[in-house]
């Protein structure tokens, strides 16, 4: 299977052998039928774009789907794009967002960028400018230069179209890697401890939470970035007042609630015009493979 995939790649690229996409497709097909996810993804790409074969997005969907269900991150992102545009499959933003999330969970930059667009425009997910900014930020840190450049542009355009408080909050979240990293950092903090967690990125996040809780009259201690007993008690008091589970943890649920109170209704914008216009068929800023 691996040898078949490697041979197909050589024929597709013309490395050491005359370039022959037909031969490549044959060897990719043999490898794909045996469960090689790289071959399945590459076949999907060739059929999606009509390289060496008649363009057939429905066949592309079939191969992408097989690889995606086996956990191939790029195939998941590619499948999300086809659902996004309704190519070879019924148009479905929810399915697109699902597959983008699956790929993004594995760090796929293309999926991170495309999720940023979904969150910015409220397509398949609830509109969330902070989450959008975070996704663009993560995509911009990836090792794919083309995706990173697109994500940086999208992040900048988003920043120019949201309110200053939302932007400041989004930048804090993005700088701290958010998501699972925030939860993981909170989980390793000493229970009730006063020690400053000097991955001081997290310390800066604590400062932001302390300031907001102080403004809401829940916290009256020093704004110092310490996840100590006073901060934990303030977080728990706020959570109880909001009918949330009083865990005392700084997590995404807490941050989202604090943001919602911090700035009601960020300045509305229309589709941002930073990625795709649904129905236009254009993939500018989204299909950057």
Image (cartoon, rainbow, N blue to C red):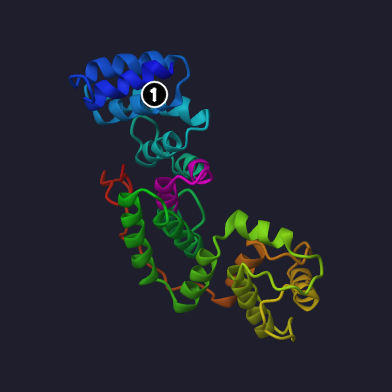
Confirm whether residue 276 shows in the render. Answer: no
Closer-to-camera residue (111/145): 145
Closer-to-camera residue (155/182): 182
Magenta segment: does it hold 113? Answer: yes
| Residue at the extreme left of the image, as rendered | 18
Is 167 situated left or right of 206 in this image? left
Residue found at x 38% / y 63%? 155
Residue 152: where, in percent of width, then height? 35, 61
Give the quarter of the image for residue 250: bottom right
The C terminus appears in which quarter of the rendering? top left
Residue topped by disc 1: 39
Magenta segment: does it hold 181? Answer: no
Q: How many marks?
A: 1
| Residue at the extreme front of the image, as rendered | 16
Give the quarter of the image for residue 65: top left
Residue 261: where, in percent of width, then height? 61, 75
Residue found at x 38% / y 40%? 81
Q: Residues within 10 Å of mark 1 (few under 14, many from 20)?
A: many
Main secondary structure type of the part rendered in magenta? helix
Residue 111: where, in percent of width, then height? 43, 46
The N terminus appears in which quarter of the rendering? top left
Residue found at x 63% / y 72%? 203
Tell me the magenta residue range. Answer: 101-115
Residue found at x 40% / y 49%? 114
Looking at the rendered structure, the secondary structure element under dot 1 is helix
């Amino acid at each position: 299977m691996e040898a078949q995939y490697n041979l197909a790649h050589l024929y597709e690229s013309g490395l050491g052998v005359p370039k022959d996409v037909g031969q490549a497709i044959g060897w990719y097909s043999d490898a794909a039928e045996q469960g090689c996810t790289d071959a399945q993804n590459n076949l999907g790409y060739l059929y999606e774009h009509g390289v060496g074969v008649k363009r057939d997005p429905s066949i592309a969907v079939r191969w992408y789907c097989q690889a995606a269900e086996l956990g191939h991150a790029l195939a998941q992102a590619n499948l999300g794009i086809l659902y996004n545009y309704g190519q070879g499959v019924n148009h479905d933003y929810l399915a697109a967002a699902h597959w983008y999330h699956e790929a993004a969970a594995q760090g796929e930059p293309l999926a991170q960028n495309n999720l940023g667009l979904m969150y910015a425009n409220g397509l398949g997910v609830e509109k969330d400018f902070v989450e959008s900014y975070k996704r663009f930020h993560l995509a911009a840190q990836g090792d794919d230069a083309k995706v990173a450049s697109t994500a940086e542009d999208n992040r900048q355009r988003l920043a120019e179209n949201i309110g200053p408080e939302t932007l400041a909050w989004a930048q804090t979240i993005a700088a701290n890697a958010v998501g699972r990293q925030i939860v993981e950092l909170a989980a390793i903090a000493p229970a009730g401890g006063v020690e400053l967690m000097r991955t001081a990125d997290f310390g800066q996040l604590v400062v932001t939470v302390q300031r907001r809780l102080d403004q809401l009259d829940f916290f009256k201690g020093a704004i110092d970035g310490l996840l100590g007993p006073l901060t934990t008690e303030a977080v728990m008091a706020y959570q109880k007042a909001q009918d949330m589970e009083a865990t005392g943890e700084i997590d995404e649920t807490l941050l989202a609630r604090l943001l919602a109170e911090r700035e009601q209704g960020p300045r509305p914008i229309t589709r941002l015009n930073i990625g795709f216009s649904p129905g236009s068929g254009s993939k500018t800023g989204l299909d950057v493979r």
